[in-house]
Amino acid sequence: MNPTENNTLRPGAGGAGKQSPHAIVIGSGFGGLAAAVRLGARGYRVTVLEKLDAPGGRAYVFRQDGFTFDAGPTIVTAPFLFEELWQLCGHKLSDDIEMKPMLPFYRIYFNDGSTMDCCGDPAAMRAEVARLSPSDVDGYENFYRFSKETYRVGFQQLGDVPFESWLDMAKVAPAMIRLESYRSIYSLVSKHVKDERLRFALSFHPLFVGGNPFNVTAIYTLISHLEREHGVHFAMGGTGSLVKGLVGLIEGQGGRIRYGEEVSAITLNGRTATGVRLKSGEVLKADVVVSNADMANTYRKLLPAEARRHWTDHRVEKARYSMSLFVWYFGTKRQYPDVEHHSIILGPRYRELIDDIFERKVLASDFSLYLHRPTKTDPSLAPPGCDTFYVLSPVPHMGSKIDWKETAERYQQSISRYLGESLLPNLEENIVSSLIVTPQDFQDRLLSYQGAAFGPEPVLLQSAWFRPHNRSEDIEHLYLVGAGTHPGAGLPGVLSSARILDKVVPDATTFRQ
């Protein structure tokens, strides 16, 4: 049955027996899935269209050789945002998902051989700082007081504000100035602590959302308090279990997800969205369209140039985009019990490497890495006696013109050698499963402009009101969620972008006949 043919609301979805408006969601990343749940809870009949053969988008799950690899996000820092989605459906998150707190959150391996375990316990963190740099303890405490205030303003007060008007920015400008948002996060951190290792430990978080710590606004210090306040968690079964759980909520509401369905265009009546055309030629009508597709792809590929006055090709193309990622997923026939669930391994350079990635856009010979070992927490993600890993290296996006078909294997081998000589002894002789994802895959498979992993870079003039709005500036009844729109990338950001829809998408009764 064509999903647009049934106009009857199902019981529990807004009133049985009445006409129900149809919402189409393009893409089943976390932003799209959360949007679908929220629209379903408000009485919309929802169809989610996914280009891939399974849900998740960047949170797709790869399975091979008995190993389970979460493709994308692995750190859950705001579980209450997931809990809220389950509550909208009359359920508890714990009914479907076991969230396990991480201790430590992650271990940082500095290039000089020292380490730092990061956690949410203030006394334990104070002791870690004192161990590394006793003279920075007071500065560290001052930084965390600042981080708490930026969290209160930036996340709690502004995280779900649509920022559709410049007046919204004007209202918060005094607070933003007081919080020194005009400074980079690295500059702000350096004001409080002097040890370079601590400066890294307190400023690297924007890399999780595609930001350059030397350029991104200091408002992102809020991530430090977000971690302390709500912890770092792992969903047992992998991040894919959260995706599966959200799909279950959507289907329980009567919504539908269609896989292998690539959208070729958003159909219009003048400057109003009326539905979508699939690559197959099928046209689906809708009252509202929500795009969880890449922001640049939505405007450049799915909408005609003549319908766009704000997000013209020129404006989209001149924007600054985040770095991309090189990700190597691998399974080993032995275990490495001394390796934590989350590890951050630093090379010899920080600022210079960041400049290579974001500014010079060259592939450096050295690297800093994020190593994920989920079998530390959940052994079911690998065969008995084995370990599942992925290692992530930030790299330039496709604007660098790097030929990844020629480069990928050589780059993977250099990472493998490095890990084998450090955290994972004899790694190469123990690998039994391997899979590589490059910026080329972000561009071709995920349709991400320039292969950027996180959409527009979160610099000050591409944040809040300056970022693509959740209600399209160009097209009526078109809405955007996900990393490329406000408030930005990362699980808290994309889930909050869906939360904003409650304020900007018309109530379902508006469309009922």
Image (tube, rainbow, N blue to C red):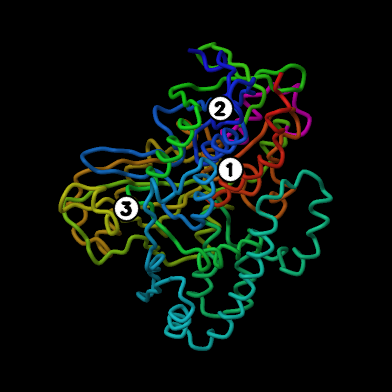
Q: Residue at x 66, y 40 (%)?
A: 501
Tell me which corner region of the image, top left, top right, bottom left or bottom right, holds residue 282.
top right
Can you identify the residue that label 1 sits on? 455
Amino acid type, callout 1: Gly
Mark 3, other Cα within 10 Å: few <14 / some 14–19 / many ≥20: some
Q: Residue at x 37, y 62 (%)?
A: 343
Can you identify the residue that label 2 sits on? 46
Q: Is residue 303 magenta?
A: yes
The answer to whether the residue labelled 3 contacts the one labelled 1, judged by CB atoms less than 8 Å apart, is no
Amino acid type, callout 2: Val
Relative side of 162 to 449, left or right: right
Q: Quadrant of the C terminus?
A: top right
Image: 450 above or below 110? above
Residue 313 visible in the shown view: yes
- The mark closer to the camera, 3 or 2, is 2
Q: Which mark is residue 414?
A: 3
Specify which label sits upstream in the sequence, 3 or 2.
Answer: 2
